[in-house]
Amino acid sequence: MHRVAPHLDIPIRQDDLRAHNLVLTFRQIVAAHDTPISRSELATATGLTRPTISRIVDDLLTAGLIVEAGPARSGSSGRPRVGLSLARTGPAGLGLDIRADVLSACVVDLTGAVRHLDFVPHTGTEPATVLPSLAAMADRAVQAAAAENLTVVGATMAAPGPVQDDSIVRFAPMLGWRDVDAGAALSAAISPGSAVLPVLVGNDARLAALGEWHAAGQTMRNFVCVSGEFDIGAGLFLDGAQLSGWAGELGHVMVRSDGPSCACGAAGCLQCYAGLTAILAAATGRGREDGSSPAVAIDTLVSVGDPRILDTLDDAAVALGIAIAGLVNLVTVDTVLLGGSYSLLASWLVDGIDRELRRRVLSANWAPIEVRPAPLGPDAAVIGAALSAVNRVREDPNGWLARVRSR
């Protein structure tokens, strides 16, 4: 067990104080992003004395969490100050994701840079098939990371549905999963020859939003990332902080009361009109037959000028606009990112969604909302999952220091 920052309602012991100050200092280095920060700047930002900062920095350097970079920015003449940056070796996070046609695995380092990205085609959705395949990918990713002097400290799997206790997928309608303890199954399946790897599970839409937020330099304050793969989900950031909890299942918001039955058990859900498989089925009368992803099949139909797919995409954009407008009337966002496979189809969706938002959002006339494709697209969820795993060290490095000292 390692000590963390103390609660305010208990006595502060010396070890607790050291742990607290280390977290405080390290978070300043993390927040500096790619800009090296000096020891004196750390002292100013934290209010700690320079000797205390020097001891903490020495601990972080010894643990391989930071490196001394080039001279930090300076507004005065004299000796340049040595900057400190996050190390690109040491702790890393592993992300796992399930898509319509492939499984994916990703490793990011402490800076958030992608160091490994792997894809394996799949067709089945049964947990007994999917989870062992993901575990095998995790083993390969851990080995690839080790070859670059990275140690995977944790993993996160992205799941298309509500998750409880960071492990149990309660209901993923489009996968057909109910009460699947994916976290425990993956932890048990990963190679016993390696150290125990904690595996958490998170909602794929929220993880995709985290990935997009990080890719944007953490500058976006109020946005929603609407992802379409198996299920349609919405990840929200408000005032620069991510909204957590059970919410986010945008695909199961009703858009037409007389609509068809949905896999979730309700009727008229957005998923029935704007889900990728629903779009493809409406345009062709059948699902994908060649093993390609629905997004690729849809794009192929668009490329040959199939009029049915263009009409169906316009209908999907209207349904998406109705659902998103209801969301935006409740919370304040200025940007709608079309993530996942929607990013590949954005050219045929943006105008229809924007039209519905301007019609239905009460504040649209004086607070316009930008609708655009998300930069990371289909890779956002797996990258966000990997970031979620390494963020455990970024938020509190004491566990990593304890691990280094015990070697």
Image (cartoon, rainbow, N blue to C red):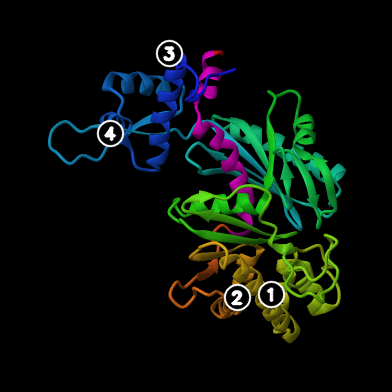
Q: Nearer the viewer, residue 51 or 170?
A: 170
What residue would you read off at disc 4? 41
- Of mark 1 and mark 4, the one earlier in the sequence is 4
Instruction: State the mark number for residue 14.
Output: 3
Amino acid residing under circle 4: Glu
Mark 4 and mark 1 in contact (Cβ < 8 Å)? no
Q: What residue lies at 71% left-to-right and 37% top-to-bottom?
A: 165
Local packing at callout 3 (Cα closer than 10 Å; few below 14, some 14-19, many 20+) is: few
Q: Is residue 302 visible?
A: yes
Q: Give the Cα separation between the discs numbered 1 and 3.
A: 58 Å
What residue would you read off at disc 2? 353
Mark 2 and mark 3 in contact (Cβ < 8 Å)? no
67 is within the stretch colored magenta: no
Amino acid residing under circle 2: Ile
Q: What residue lies at 82% left-to-right and 78% top-to-bottom?
A: 284
399 is within the stretch colored magenta: yes
Q: Give the Cα separation between the discs numbered 4 and 2.
A: 46 Å
